[in-house]
Amino acid sequence: MSTDARRPAVVVANLSAPEINRLGIELARRGVLRKYVRPYVNRRRWWERLIEHTPGIGKLYAGTLGRRTPPDGMPLNAIVEAGIAQDFAGAAVGRLPLLRREWRRHTAHGLILAAERAVARKAGELAAGADLAVASYGTGQYAFEAIRRGGGRAVLSYPIAHNRYQARLYAEEAERAPEFAAALPRIDLLPAEYSARLDRECELADRIIVGSSFVRQSFIESGYDARKIAVTPYGVDTERFMPRTGPRDDGTFRLLFVGQIGQRKGMSYLLKAYELFRKSDSELHLVGTFSGGREVYDRYTPL
């Protein structure tokens, strides 16, 4: 344990959550961040610069893993990478055009889970002797176990509904709209080890941080003490995202969706509603990646 109660030692584990990046930066600013464990980050090392200038793969790297530069304000000496091989393999598999889309998606997802497991294990190694461990869901079990042995505290960030609640919700949704069932996440197909790790993290955490009252309620309905769940709404970078100035009415009514395109986001309800509403002076724009089952939306392509 840290001998200076005013400056605790904090270990952070994160797969990709931007809010955990922001937290890590603030912890570093306060001088309490011991280590920040995450998947691959482009540090501009010699081999990374070599990849960037290699014909054929340089452009692919620049548009995928090469974009993962350290967040501004995060000290490089605090970053510990884990699961690098799985990261690169996942990026490659997900973009091989000769392989079937479904196989690519399934394999890439498995590699992501493997990278997440590597982050979790590395964080567990580094958490011994720390005062606090903070983790995004899926990366916290081993760090929480280590921190608990030393008498420290554990905080879990869980931005989506509890996994058991999700499974029930998706099963109900599949019955309600079976034609869109293929576009729902298959929680039931997750490895048993992964589901057990999620449950173990929630059990070990002193606090579970969620982003909305809906997610909080999903934990309560799954049997967790409400006093353990804290709602912290996510913020926005107002220097990057702000209302546009000047006139912008060109006579077209536009609807914009940005995010993962799938039934988890209720995409069928948006498309059906727009199909009823659609007029000659309106447009619907969807920006994002398909989460699976994209063929269920084929008939809506003309929209």
Image (tube, helix red, strand yellow):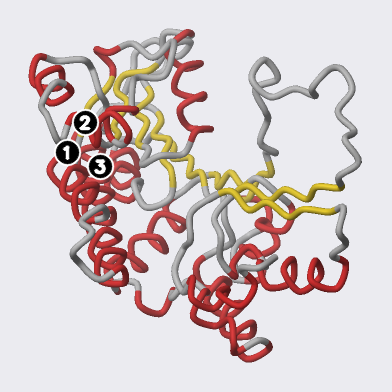
Q: Are marks 3 and 1 in contact (CB under 8 Å)?
A: no
Real-space Cα distance between discs 1 and 2?
7 Å
Q: Which residue is mark 2?
A: 81
The mark nearer the N terminus, 3 or 1, is 1
Residue beneath disc 3: 119
Q: Residue 287: x and y, percent?
A: 59, 48
Q: Nearer the viewer, mark 3 or mark 1?
A: 1
Helix, strand or loop at mark 2: strand
Residue nearer the viewer, 46 or 203: 46
Give the quadrant of residue 101: bottom left
Cα gap from disc 3 to disc 1, whole angstroms: 10 Å
Q: Are marks 1 and 2 in contact (CB under 8 Å)?
A: yes
Q: Nearer the viewer, residue 225 or 235?
A: 235
Question: Could you tell me residue 234's position as x and y percent?
Answer: 66, 36
Give SS at disc 1.
Answer: helix
Residue 62 badge:
none
| Residue at the image point whose x is 28% and y is 28% from the top | 62
Q: Mark 2 and mark 3: span between their CA atoms?
A: 8 Å
Checking the image for residue 84, the label placed there is: 1
Question: Looking at the image, which residue is at 25% across and 64% down?
Answer: 104
Q: Secondary structure at mark 3?
A: helix
Establish if 167 lies above or below 277. Answer: below
